[in-house]
Image (cartoon, coloured by chain):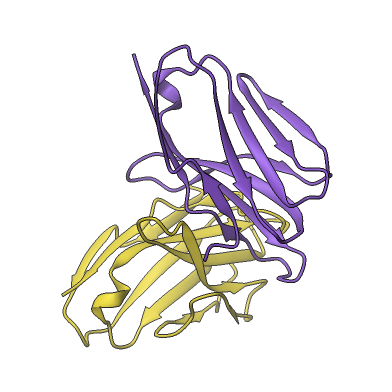
Chain colours: A purple, B yellow
Amino acid sequence: TQLLEQSPQFLSIQEGENLTVYCNSSSVFSSLQWYRQEPGEGPVLLVTVVTGGEVKKLKRLTFQFGDARKDSSLHITAAQPGDTGLYLCAGDPQEYGNKLVFGAGTILRVKS
Amino acid sequence: NAGVTQTPKFRVLKTGQSMTLLCAQDMNHEYMYWYRQDPGMGLRLIHYSVGEGTTAKGEVPDGYNVSRLKKQNFLLGLESAAPSQTSVYFCASSYSGLANEFFGPGTRLTVL
């Protein structure tokens, strides 16, 4: 059982559509991060959220940290083919110290 | 800056053979991590280090050893490789330990 559950596992959409990816847990996290990974490469950090209820925007990407710091979401507006990739959420549970646990990831494919 | 580099990129081993994976970073980061990534499971922490000369176990340490003799290098060793260690291995480094900001490109290891 993953400490961080990501949904959906796979998402295939048309260019221009909106989408939301969820990351949920029963544990409280000191912070949550979102990464994007392309085939054959390492994950690249997109954002870190640390305050319950925090919302961060990165161009067409909006990240939200739940009020109770147990969940997070990533919303993409008007998806583009360049958004295609594996999206990973990760967090450091309060009981783990400075170590991250990762969700299994969401594979996003945006078709033109 | 090269960032985080990993050597080798690919390797095939026979069961029982040993090998060492090298991770190097040129950002003067204190924290370094070794993960393995398997389909449907996200990244799992094998070992980590919070500074030169220190190492600690992560989530899945069995069958692996690590050393951090120099601040810029973090070595992952497999003493007697097993097919269950077939995976993609990622090294990461971080300045603050809050998030794994920089990942290497990965090493794809196959154990026959």
Q: Nearer the viewer, residue A73 or B25?
A: A73
- Residue plotted at (16% across, 79% down): B14
Confirm whether residue B54 shows in the render. Answer: yes
Q: Is residue A14 left or right of residue B17?
A: right
Quarter of the figure with residue A63: top right
Q: In this view, does B95 lie above or below A76?
A: below
Q: Position of residue B93 (x, y in %)?
A: 58, 58
Q: Is residue B65 above or below residue A111?
A: below
Q: Is residue B35 left or right of residue A27?
A: left
Which quadrant, please, contains the C terminus of chain B?
bottom left
- Residue plotted at (37% across, 61% down): B38
Quarter of the figure with residue B75: bottom left
- Residue plotted at (45% across, 17% down): A80
Q: Position of residue A25 (x, y in %)?
A: 66, 56
Q: Position of residue A102 (x, y in %)?
A: 55, 57
- Residue plotted at (72% across, 35% down): A64
Q: In this view, does B96 lie to the left or right of B23?
A: right
Q: In this view, does A82 lie to the left or right of A60?
A: left
Q: Position of residue A35 (x, y in %)?
A: 55, 43
- Total label count? 0
Q: Is residue B28 above or below residue A74?
A: below
Q: Nearer the viewer, residue B72 or A110?
A: A110
Q: Nearer the viewer, residue A83 or B7?
A: A83
Quarter of the figure with residue B69: bottom right
Confirm whether residue B72 shows in the render. Answer: no
